[in-house]
Amino acid sequence: MKHVVITLTIICLVFFVGCGQNDKTEKSSSNTEEKLRQAVEAVMEQIEKEKKDQTEDAIVIETVKDKTNQTVEAVKEETAQIDLPNPPTIEEVQSILEHLGYEPGPIDGILGPRTENAVKKFLNDQGILQNFKIDNNFILLLRNAKNK
């Protein structure tokens, strides 16, 4: 879009330079060529400046993406290393799921299909649409839901 505007600007400059000459005070073609050359140089400088700005913007965007990814990875590492005084058990997961109204099947410590479905339904209801693993983060989520 910018290149179209620049091209139109050049065409207008050429047109107006040509129209600016009247029959009585006709300027030399070298003067017209010089004005046109200056206009083209100005446009080219503007294009180079815009390219440089776009390159700098792309570098900033990539830097922000990298820093964000590093922060996300650091948070994942930190939260994965939470030491709970009471590590999660399948029985606790089943018990809390049952308390919350999900149907995990018998509270027997076996991660069977009904327990897995109850976990998936719970996560879906929490807006978490990803694969699960029963870890410290999951049990904290369950315990918080139970205490609400």
Image (spheres, rainbow, N blue to C red):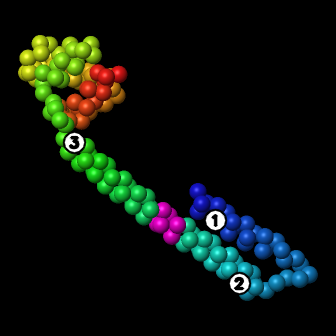
Magenta range is 52-57
Q: Quadrant of residue 24?
A: bottom right
Judging by the rendered image, the residue that carries numbered circle 2 is: 34
Which numbered disc flags the more N-terminal residue, 2 or 1?
1
Percent across and percent down for residue 99 are 24, 15
Q: Classify mark 2: helix, strand or loop.
A: helix
Instruction: Answer few, some or many: residues within 10 Å of disc 2's Cα (few below 14, many 20 plus, some between 14 and 19).
Output: few
Q: Which residue is rendered at x = 66% and y = 80% of the image?
A: 37
Q: Quadrant of residue 108?
A: top left
Q: Nearer the viewer, residue 97 or 124?
A: 97
Q: Classify mark 3: helix, strand or loop.
A: loop
Q: Tell me how far mark 2 sits from mark 1, CA to CA.
A: 18 Å
Q: Tell me how far mark 3 sits from mark 1, CA to CA.
A: 58 Å
Tag shown at residue 6: 1
Judging by the rendered image, the residue that carries numbered circle 3 is: 82
Instruction: Give the residue at the far right of this rendering.
Output: 24
Which numbered disc flags the more N-terminal residue, 2 or 3?
2
Q: Is 54 included in the stretch rendered in magenta?
A: yes
Question: Where the C terminus falls, by quadrant?
Answer: top left
Q: Nearer the viewer, residue 10 or 136?
A: 136
Q: How many marks?
A: 3
Q: Which residue is rendered at x = 60% and y = 71% of the image?
A: 46
Q: Quadrant of residue 38?
A: bottom right
